[in-house]
Image: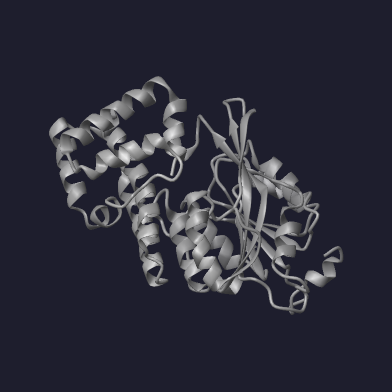
Amino acid sequence: MADEKRSRNADSQAPFVSIVLPCYGVERYVDQALDDLQAQTFGDWELIAVDDASPDASAERVRARMAGDVRIKLVSHAENRGLSAARNTGLAHARGRYVWMPDPDDRYDPELLAEACAALGAGWAAGELADVALFGCVEEYRDERDAVTEEHAVLPGANGLLAQEELRGAVLGFEERTLYGYAWNKLYRRNLLDGLAFGDTPLVEDILFSIRVFDRAQTCAVVDKGLYRYAKRTASNLTNRFVPRYFEVHRLRVEELYRQQERWGLATPEVRSRLGSLYGRYILSALERNCDARAQMTHAQRAAWCRALVRDDLFRTLIPGAHSRSGTVLEVSLLILKTRCVPAYLALGRVIHVVRARTSGGYAHLKMQR
């Protein structure tokens, strides 16, 4: 691993890893991301920064580094097309054997690429390599000054090479730890992605992409370390914004996860229970969001939403057997959902809305339960 020449694939001009870095409105952060990439102890990479018609100086920051580092390239969109399109553009330009897609407003440990590439397999210069490398992260909660106020390690709970059967059995655990859906905590074999692209469904484009990739993956190298530092900014994080289609897209998330388990022959009562717990969390969040003034829903509309919910096939499949594996509050809430009582649902949504307004900590605790 110390000798970078060992990491070259059959094409001596191609790097081992292509790094795809979408850039839009990240002038404040991109220099730190570039610092972290250039500080990687594994140097056999190319960086494809994609300027998605950013309104600030993000592209200029990248250009300033290009003069001193031939590994850095910049591709530009004539108009803003969004994160998925930027990633797809980067993938189209990638030449490496593997692809990594970090976010430009996060930080990366200097050993990240070295650890992930080493995990792909012993004797990796000449032998078989895993299809995917997956690693953990450290969630960094940052205030309006971008100072870290709290850290929380999120680890895969497994380590080493997983063959297909074991990998498929581990996927739901990765999802429960929030590590399955992210694109930035994985290295993908580039030819594994042939014919795949990121879609434009907000909030869940990463998980839908991941599901398609893992349908194909035969092996995965898991690194049980927090190598990626995920910035959760209270002022700007997408999950803190009001998203009108929140429930619709997360229902799709859970359904796609369940369909994958079905395809793999793993849709057991235990799996339905675990996915039902996850689905229940999204239902509770939707009940609360329906009470938000920005939802513009009347009491009658909220009641109609609840009646439609309990008639839904996914609800009927997953909620009856759902149980929380870690929290009493969620377990009690799931018991209420199992009653299929619309007035109880409406009351529960209002209670959660009040709790969220008065104490973000209590609401966050509920969100973390499974």
Counting from the top left corner in percent of width and height, residue 131 is at: 61, 70
Q: How many marks?
A: 0
Q: In this view, does 1 lie above or below 23?
A: below
Counting from the top left corner in percent of width and height, residue 22 is at: 57, 52
Q: Is residue 68 above or below residue 139?
A: below
Asked whether residue 304 appears in the rendered view, the answer is: yes
Q: Which of 34 and 297 is in front in this view?
A: 297
Asked whether residue 78 appears in the rendered view, the answer is: no
Residue at horizontal 64%, vertical 39%?
29
The quadrant of the rendering that contains the N terminus is bottom right
State which quadrant residue 48 falls in: bottom right
Residue at horizontal 33%, vertical 49%?
322
State which quadrant residue 261 falls in: bottom left
Left or right: 282 with respect to 148? Answer: left
Q: In this view, does 20 lie above or below 63?
A: below
Counting from the top left corner in percent of width and height, residue 209 is at: 47, 61
Left or right: 285 with respect to 169? Answer: left
